[in-house]
Amino acid sequence: MSHGRRKIAKLIVAAMLLSSAAPQAMAQDSTADAGILEEIVVTGSRIARRDATAVGPITTMTAEDMVYAAPTSVGDLLQSLPSVGVSLNSNGTQGTSFGVSSINLRYLGSAEGSGNRTLVLVDGHRWVNAVGGRGFRDFVDLNTIPLGIIDRIEVLKDGASAIYGADAIAGVVNIHTKGRVDGIEANMRAGITERGDNENVSAYVNAGHGFDRGHVLLSASYTKSDPILTSDRKVTQRARAPLTAPPTSPRGLFVLPGLANNSYFGTPSAFANNAANAITLIPGTTSIGAGAAADGSFRVATLAADDYNTMTQGIYATGPAERAGLFGRLTYDLSDNVTGKVEALYNNRKSSQRFSPFPLDVRGSNGFTISRDQAFNPFGTANGVPTANALAFSGSTFRIQRVPVEVGNRDNIQEVDTYRLAGSLEGRFDLAGEWRWDAFASYSKNKASFDAVNQINLENVYRSLASHAICAAAAGCVPLNIFGTITPQMADYIRYNAHDENGASQYDLAVNVSRELWELPAGPLGFAAGYEYRKEKAYDLPDAFAASLSTVLPLVSGARQSPTTAQSRDPTRGSYDLHEVYGEVNLPLLADMPGAYRLDVDAAIRYSDYSTVGGKATTKFGVSYRPVEDLLVRSTYSQGFRAPSILELYQGQRQTNFQGVDPCNGGGAGKTGCTGVPTTYNQNQFNGGLIAGVTAGNQNLKPETADTYSAGLALTPSGLPGLTLTADWFEIKVKDAIASQTATQILTSCANTGVFCNLVNRAASGEVTRLTQAVVNLSRIEVEGIDATARYEFTTDLGDFEVAVDVSYLEKYRTFVPQPDGSIAIDDRAGKGDQPRSTFPRWKGQASARYKVDSIDLGWKARYIGSSTDVAGNAINGGRTKSITYQDLQLGYTIPDSDTRVALGIDNVLDRQPPLSAANNPINFDMYTYDIRGRYFYATLSTKF
């Protein structure tokens, strides 16, 4: 069977499945509104039309959907859709969310949880990019949009670069704000988990008043959520990866050359002489023995006697967040044909993530030493050891690891302020017919601070372990008792709190015109055209000391070291601007003919001219065919375009830790790029097995391009009013995709072929001290799948019913990455979950049922996430992550003769916990895909007056 026939067969199978579907999705397909007669503008087109189903596959989340979902954020609503892939959310304590919420349609974000290939609009206009993480982002933070101003959300699951410009490769999310509010409407919500944590309180108040020729709308919103500790969920109580050696702990792990087989201390051979014989302080020891008895306070660390679990040390599985927003809009009819609007928004977000204390790692290979006269060296003169027998510690084998709980848990704390001022004019004029026009201008900015609390000042650690003379000569130096009790004064001396600032701003100017050009036999030919100018700016100002190179610490292989454990990176500033023009037509070709109830063709073209990468034109074509009134057959082809973002172009070098496998472990068995690596090298002995490195931007990037194909059916049988069945196949091919090679890919290329070895720096021990990863136009991506929806609304003597189901099937998600030897490595992620925070189940679905009678309403909804493969043969789940279904219930009551409704709800009624995942050690589950809360109770109150 040909490739095209297979696609058609899959579509037919999906349609057949729909015909037997019973449960329901919270999100509603727009085809259900086929009976609407007024002219509207839907997402995916700038042309007003009467048949919204002619545009393409759109999912609409209505005000009623939001009532039954009772969300605390926009992300809560959108990320549950089956077509949405791994997205940043409030579970991001162990990832890279830092309080940001994203929407990642079709899994196409270019980085972990990124939404940079999904375009987010508010009332059809651009929104400023996110900030507040380790620098700025290149996608919209949904947490900067107050929930109280939202009326409905449309999700176009189709490429739309020709309509809206760059970034719309995976699709478009258009958030529509409330229009006219007369009087006051208020909503309050409070919730808490069955375990008594993650308490949430949220509310919004909207007030509107009309006068003569105008209207004023004011909105205030607030939400606050408490954290969940890893110790309070069985899934996250400890890392599930089996331990092979004692971990570091507050009692320390000490490798002390010279102590083994020491005649003065009477120690046995191998005592503390290597990692396998590292010693630790004996539990309960409050005072280390003096003189020759010092070694008696230590023992060789073993499992399970010296186990230590950092996951129960007060760290967050879900971090706390607090948001407050203000919004105002003035609408005024300047004349009978012209209306003006001015609106302003302010939003504040506070969020934090708590980690275990930084694992202090003092190494002789990094130039650290402990002097024989250091104040707290138990094997030195300060502890009564004669000078002739006193030990100093240095050299490549010397190493001390300790969890300094006295310094405190690491906290990352963000505060983000969002400002937006916008104005618009819209109207009509006559010029050989009636024209509609609108003009829009806005200025937006995000401003953020990022505090990394309770990091370690390595320069002060170095001074505090040095000789008495060196410490005494340094202002404020406090000798460190790294072997025993760390006092508050010691902790204060080695503690470092880093402060970063970053921001992004946007200027946007757009003008659009539209009209019906002339009448065709099947209806008027619709036309729209427009111009847009946009300027994007961003900056990242990391902590100056953390970003510097130390002048105190010794050189390592000729290179200067970082002075703190806080993440270091170079400052970044960048900007670009662009001019765009577009045109769109809707041609109704046939109507009311045998075998052709209606046939429409859509076409659009857009030209974008970037100051960074030049110009590019994109096109889109769509066909909407109704052989009979009840059946719609639709198909689209569109070209996508995404210019490299400021982050991808200009990001300064940023320090990070990569997950990966080093092929030079054990010396690399003669591999070309492993020459000189000792056979004793094992990456797990260094940096917790992670690979130290840096990422950076690339000013030589070129734009990505994409081709998107879709075909679908929509059935609305007149003999069964209220029933809608839809199925849509899609395929997206992204060329010159902007991406980075993984650390494993770089190391493997270096080891096997010698290519990319310039990106890998190693110490004499074999440890990778720095791996450089830069973004390039590296790969090709192909995504294919099917979306299907069934929805049925009906009324009986017992009340009103609404049931539906929304299903998404991922047929493939393939990346094609060129290798140094000229071959192409193909990785199909569909059905896999064997990488951290990167789960791609083939099947995802969402269902709901609603019932209303008199003043009572009842809602049920469910969300299904299919199984996926994990790390092969692992001891946690055998290599497969299980499927899971979350089910929610809500009971509402509307007080008679009023607009006041109260509701009680339970999310995750069956208290399902996330399936275990070996790839997501140590948190043990993909936090961007699954919910850790468990059973959750809430109550809502809404009223209008």
Image (cartoon, rainbow, N blue to C red):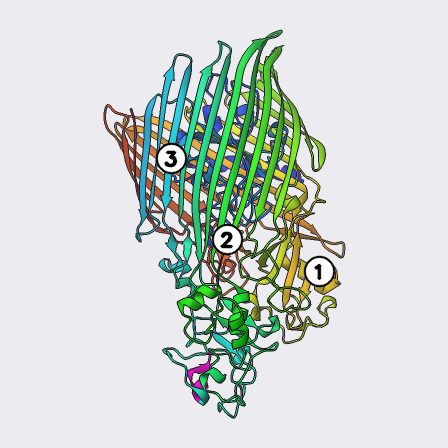
Residue on which the image places disc 2: 95
Q: Is residue 876 above or below residue 84?
A: below
Marks 2 and 1 sit apart, C-alpha to C-alpha, by 27 Å
* Residue that sits furthest to the left in the current view: 896
User: Percent position (x, y) of residue 788?
Assistant: 50, 36
The nearer-to-camera label among 2 and 1 is: 2
Which amino acid type corresponds to the residue marked 3 in the rendered image?
Answer: Ser
Q: Is residue 758 left or right of residue 87?
A: right
What stretch of residues is rendered in magenta? 293-301
Residue on which the image places disc 3: 221
* Residue that sits furthest to the bottom in the current view: 263
Q: Which part of the image, by quadrant, shows the C terminus? A: top left
The nearer-to-camera label among 2 and 3 is: 3
Task: Give the mark nearer the N terminus: 3 vs 1.
Answer: 3
Residue on which the image places disc 1: 749
Q: Quadrant of residue 689?
A: bottom right
Neighbour tally class for label 1: few under 14, some 14-19, many 20 plus, Cα within 10 Å: many
User: Percent position (x, y) of residue 55?
Assistant: 56, 25
Marks 3 and 1 sit apart, C-alpha to C-alpha, by 52 Å
Question: Which disc number belongs to residue 395?
Answer: none
Looking at the image, which residue is at 73% across and 71% down? 675
Q: Is residue 75 above or below residue 280?
A: above
Q: Is residue 418 above or below residue 895?
A: below
Q: Name the residue nearer the viewer: 76 or 865.
A: 76
Which amino acid type corresponds to the residue marked 2 in the rendered image?
Answer: Gly
Callout 2: helix, strand or loop?
loop
